[in-house]
Amino acid sequence: MSNIQSRRDFLKSTAAAGGGLVLGFSWLTTEAFQPKVLGNTAADAIDFNAYLSISPSGTVTIFSPNPEIGQGIKTAFPIIVAEELDADWEKVKVEQSPLDTKKFERQLTGGSGAIRHSWERLRKAGATARLMLIEAAAKQWNVAASECSANKGFVVHTSGKKLSYGELATAAAQIAPPKDVKLKSTKDFSLIGKSIKGVDNKDILSGKRLFGIDYKREGMLHAMIQRPPAFGLKLKSFDATEAKKMPGVVDVVSFANKVAVVGKTTWEVMQARKAVKIEWEKDKDLESSSDHDRIFKEMLSSSTPTIHRKDGDVEAAFKNAYKVIEAEYQCPFLPHSPMEPMNFFAHYKGDSIEMAGPSQTPEAAQKQVAKMLNLAPEKVSIELTRMGGGFGRRLNTDYAVEAAELSSIIKAPVKVTWSREDDMTGGIYRPAVRYRFKASIDKAGNITGYMLHGASINAGNSTRPDNFPSGAVENVLIQSNDHKSPITTGPWRAPITNFLAYAEQAFLDEVAMAGGKDPIQLRLELLDKAEQKPVGKLTYEPNRFREVIKLAAEKAGWNKKKKGVYQGFSVYFSHASYVAQIAEMAVVKGKPVLKKVYAAVDCGIVINESSARNQIFGAVVDGLGHAMYGNITFKEGAPQQDNFNKYRLIRYNEVPEIEAHFVYNGIEPTGLGEPALPPTGGAIANAIFKSTGKRLYNQPFVEQGATVG
Amino acid sequence: MALFNLKINGKTYKADVDGNTPLLWVLRDHLDLVGTKYGCGIAMCGACTVHVNGEATRSCVMPVSALENATITTVEGLSETASHPVQQAWDETDVPQCGYCQAGQMMTAAALLSKNSNPSDKDIEEAMVGNICRCGTYHRIHDAVKLAASKMKK
C-alpha cells in the first residue's frame, strides 16, 4: 500500500449520492463569504460575497484576487465561479480584486498553487450565490426551491417560468447564505474545460494602460536608480553636480548603497543617471565564474554535506554493484528577463503610502514596506497591475520596497523604472548548481542504489529529496552543500526543478543505457516498485506518473518511428502535476535538428483548455530556450551580460512543433504555470544523445556545440 | 528642447522634448500612448515596434527629431477597440500570456501583411524573428498571422 495521502481519496469518501459534492465546511467564518464585504464597484451592483456581485441589469462582476502574470489566472478563477453560479459567460465582467489577504488568503502568484488553493473556495462562492438566487425565485413564485434550477443567468421553474439573475439579485442578497452547498458534478460542467479567451485580451491588444510600467498619477515623478555594478561592491561616494544640471532632473538622492536620479520623464532620468559620477568600494568577495567552478568541486568533495534523505545503504549497494554509473551536471545563473522590466509606483504621505505595480507577492511587499516605514500594514495600499511576465523575479520585493523608500525620502509620488540593463544585472538570479549522480545497477539493469549530491550557490537545498526515483529504489542518499555568495538569487520558474529535472532525467537515460533497458521501461518498472513496495516516503502517485508516460509514448509512437527520427524521453512530477515529454530530432546535413516535442500532462481537471495549452507550449519553449542559450557569467562580481545583444533568448524561428495532450481524469485541478517546463531539457538532451551519441552535461547546450535547428 | 509636430494615428501631436529623445519615450511619457512598450532600449526585442511611413520600426532607437514629416502608427492606431484584423486574429487565436510584447508583435505582423497579403511561412519567420516573446507564444503568433492574412483578404 502506498502511504500517500491523496486528496482525491479524501474527496471520494465525502462524495454524496447524486454525483455532486456536499461539503460541510467552515468557510462562512472567513471574511470572503460574509455578505457586503466589498465596496460596490458599480452604483447598483449587489455583492453576494467577496468574489462576485450581480447588478439588476444582469451583469455579473467576478473579482479575481490573484496577481496576473501571464498564467491566465484572471480568466481561470472567474470561469470556476461562473461555472457554479451558472452564469452566462457573455454577461460576466472580470475585475482585479484589491489586495486583501484576510478575505482571499493566498493572493500570490508562485508555485503553481493558485488553482489548488482556491478551487473549492471559488466553486462555493458561485454555488452559494446560485442557491440564494434559486431561493429568491422560489419565494417569489411561492414554490419549492427543489422545483427550480439555474441555467445561464436565469432561474427556471419546472412550469417554464423564469427570472433573470439581474431581476433576482436584490431579493437574493437578503437571503442568508446556505451552510451546506452542493457543488456540481464534474460531468455537468459547461464552462470548465472549454477554451475561453483571456479576459484582458482586447485591452492588451489595443494597448490600454494595464501594466505596472504604464502606471501614471497626476504629478508623478520618474526615477532611475544606479545600483552597485558588481555583487560585493558598496557605494563610496558620488558627485551629482553635472547630473543635476541636466534637463528634467528634479533631484539626485542616495540611500541603501544606491543613487537615485529623480526627474520629469523616464528618458531624462536615464540620461542624467549616466552623468552621475559614482565611486564604489569593495564590501564582500568579488566572485568570478571561474571561482564558482572551483567552489562547486570543493563542495562536491565535502565530507560534511547536509543529508536530506537516506534509505538503506548506498555505499553497500555501490560496492556490490554489477555496474556503477557516475555523472555530473552543471547549470549557470539565469536572469528571469520578463519583457516588462521591474518598476513600481509609490506615493508616501507621512502616515500612509499608496503603491501600485507588478508583484507576485503583494502581501509580502506590503509588510516589508510597512516595516521599513514604521507604518501599520493597512496603511500601505498596493494596487495590483497586470505583470509583463515575472518567472519568479517578482516574488522578490526589492523593487517595490526601494520605490517606497525613495518616495519617503523625496516626499513625492514617483515611479521607479529599471532599464533592461538594470534588470539583467540587478541580481535575483536562478542559482547556479552542479549535481553529482551515482547509481548502481544489477546484472538485469535494475537500479540498486541512487545517490544525488547537489552543490549550489545561494540555493539552500538544491535537491528535491523525495522526488522520483526516491521511493522506488532500495538504497538512496540525497545530500547537498550550498555556498553563500554576494550574488543574489531567488526562485526562477519551477525553482530548482527547472535544472534538477534535466539532470535527473538525463542521468536516468544514462542508467537505462548502461543496463540495456529502454528508458521508458526503466521508469515503468521503477513506478511498479514504488506502487507495490515503496521505500520510505512517497510523495507522488505512481499510477498518475504511469498514465502520462503511456500517453506520451502512444502519441509520439515511442520506438515506432522510422529511421532518421531520434526520440528522447523525460517525465517529471512537480507542483502537483505530472508531465511526460518526448523530443524528436532529425539529423540534417550532419547536425541535429529538433523537430517536435510531445507533452502529455496530468493537471487534473483542465479549467481553460486554450490557456492550459498556451502554458504548456510556452513552458516547453522556455525550457528549450534557457537550456540551449541562457547564461549569466561573472567577472569580479560583475555580470557580463546586460541586454539581449549579449544574452540570447529563444526566438520565433527556433521553436519546434509542439503537441500537447491531457489525461482527462476528472481529478481536482492542479497548477500549470510551471510543471511543463522541468521535463523539456531532459527530453531534448536525451534526443540529442540518440542522434549524435554526445551526452550533454552542462547548460547552456549551445556552449557544448549542440544545435537544435 | 524643441517643439515637434508628430503625425500619429491620424492626429497631430505636439511634443516639447530634446530632439534625441527616442519616439518610444515621447509616446509613453509625453503623449500618453503607452501601448508601445519598452523592452530593451537597443532594438533587440521588438516590444517597441511602431510603423513609420508604413515600415515596422523600433521606436526605442528612433530619435524624434527624425520624424517631423513622418506618418506614425502605434498599436492604438490599429484600432482602439481591437477591431483591426490583426488584433482580431490575435484575440481569436488567444495569443497573449502576459501580453507585454504583443503590441510589438502585432505591429510587425501588420507591416508585413500590408505589403504581402499572402506570406509564406518563411516570409512570416523573417518578419517575426526580431520580436521576442518571453512567454513563448510563437506558435500562436504564427497561427494569428495566418488568420489575419485570411481576414484581410476578405
Image (cartoon, coloured by chain):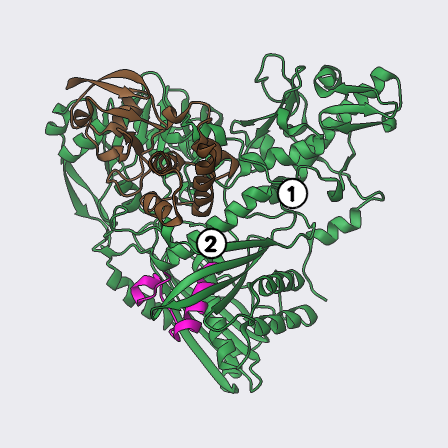
Indicate yes or no whether the magenta region holds residue A470: no
Residue B76 visible (yes or no): yes
The quarter of the image holding the C terminus of chain A is: bottom left
User: Does the stretch in magenta take in A683?
Assistant: yes
| Tag 1 subunit | A
Q: Look at the numbered discs 1 and 2 and tell me whether their residues touch, using CB distance below 8 Å.
A: no
Relative to B71, say whether A444 is above or below: below
Rendered hue of chain A is green
Give A536 or B4, whichever is nearer the viewer. Answer: B4
Residue located 44% across and 28% down the image: B84
Q: Name the residue under label 2.
A: A620
Q: Which chain carries label 2?
A: A
Query: Would residue A479 be visible to someone looking at this image?
Result: no
Q: Position of residue A606 (x, y in %)?
A: 63, 46
Q: What element carries label 2?
A: helix
Quadrant location of the N terminus of chain A? bottom right
Instruction: Give amino acid for label 2.
Output: Val
Q: Where is residue A354 in the image (x, y as percent from the top left)?
A: 41, 23
**Amino acid type indicated by mark 1:** Gly
What is the CA distance from the residue labelled 1 to the residue labelled 2?
A: 22 Å
Q: Give the range drawn in magenta.
A: A680-709
Q: Which mark is residue A193?
A: 1
Q: Which of A592 and A230 is in front in this view?
A: A592
- Visual hue assigned to chain B: brown
